[in-house]
Amino acid sequence: MRQSRFKRICVFCGSSQGKKRSYHDAAIELGNELVARGVDLVYGGGSIGLMGMVSQAVHDGGRHVIGVIPKTLMTPEVCPLLMHVYNYNY
């Protein structure tokens, strides 16, 4: 597998799993491909739905996962893997 020239890639996708099994499979395949190419993930920050599947695959593969999420949505159910919190007041 060829290493990517990118260090990180930003992925935004659904917080639902979608109606087709192919969406689920594609999300996991994307996460595994990022790991195989040595790319870290920046994403919408949740652990549910398609974005949760991508992030879990990348995390399980040992890559860094950076979630960007509004503070009001940061609950243990949505962000169980949360390790660091940076507050920005814009």
Image (cartoon, grey):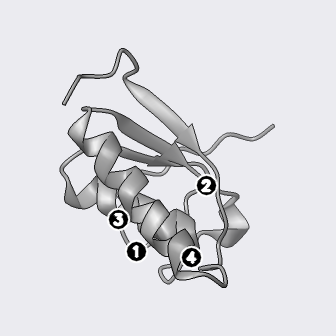
Give the number of the disc on residue 90: none
Where 27 sits versus 86, above or below?
below
Where 54 sits versus 87, above or below?
below
User: Image quadrant of residue 35?
Assistant: top left
* Contact, mark 4 vs mark 1 (Cβ under 8 Å): no
Residue appearing at x 22%, y 40% in the figure: 36
Task: Name the amino acid, label 4.
Answer: Gly
Alpha carbons under labels 4 and 2: distance apart = 11 Å
Name the residue nearer the viewer: 75 or 59. Answer: 59
Residue hosting label 1:
80
Circle 2 SS class? loop
Residue hosting label 2:
44
Where 7 sits versus 75, above or below?
above
* Whether residue 22 is visible: yes
Give the number of the disc on residue 49: 4
Q: Position of residue 69 (x, y in %)?
A: 64, 56
